[in-house]
Image (spheres, helix red, strand yellow):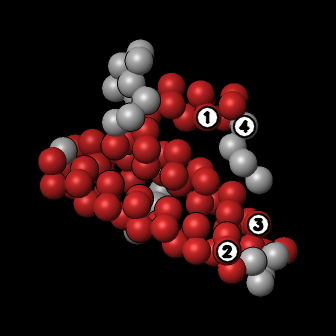
Amino acid sequence: MAITKEKKTEIIGSFSRGEADTGSPEVQIALLTARINDLTDHFKSHAKDHASRRGLLMMVSKRSSLLKYLRLHNRKSYLEVIGRLGIRK
């Protein structure tokens, strides 16, 4: 259910601004999206797992806040991230 270390380093490598960048909004949004997708699959077989559902809602809210920040401060980067992740229509 959790993201493997290899997958996490792959995501960080593809969305980071530089070599040592692990905390930029782009990286955080990509990591949250991967975790959200994993939890969404989890709920297909565990529909009554309300504790995890609360965590999912908190992650979605955090990702929404980060996307709003990115949209207001760096529009080009925002459009690139949502295009690569396919999270907006």
- Apparent side of residue 59 relative to residue 78 in the rendered image (left or right): right
Answer few, some or many: residues within 10 Å of disc 3's Cα (few below 14, many 20 plus, some between 14 and 19).
some
Q: Earlier in the sequence, mark 3 or mark 2?
A: 3
- Picture disc at residue 42: 3
Where residue 4 is drawn, which disc sits there? 4
Q: Are marks 1 and 3 in contact (CB under 8 Å)?
A: no
Cα distance between the residues tagged 1 and 3: 19 Å
Residue type indicated by callout 4: Thr
Identify the mark nearer the N-term, 3 or 4.
4
**Residue at 49% across / 67% down in the picture?**
58
Q: Amino acid at mark 2?
A: Ala
Q: In the displayed image of the protein, which residue is found farthest to the bottom?
A: 48
Q: Residues within 10 Å of mark 1 (few under 14, many from 20)?
A: some
Among all residues in the image, which is located at the extreme front?
Answer: 51
How far apart in space, not on screen, are marks 2 and 4 (Cα)? Answer: 22 Å
What residue is disc 2 on? 51
> From this viewpoint, which residue is outermost toward the left?
73
**Callout 3 touching callout 4 (CB < 8 Å):** no
Instruction: Please tell me which residue is depicted at 30% across the width and 50% down the height of the picture.
Output: 79
Q: Position of residue 9 (x, y in %)?
A: 59, 28
Please tell me which of labels 2 and 4 falls first in the chain: 4
Q: Which residue is mark 1?
A: 8
Mark 1 residue element: helix
Label 2, secondary structure: give it: helix
The kind of residue on which mark 1 rests is: Lys
Task: Name the residue nearer the viewer: 82 or 22.
Answer: 22
Which numbered circle lies on residue 39?
A: none
Nearer to us in this view, 42 or 89: 42
Q: Secondary structure at mark 4?
A: loop
Can you tell which of label 2 and label 1 is closer to the viewer? 2
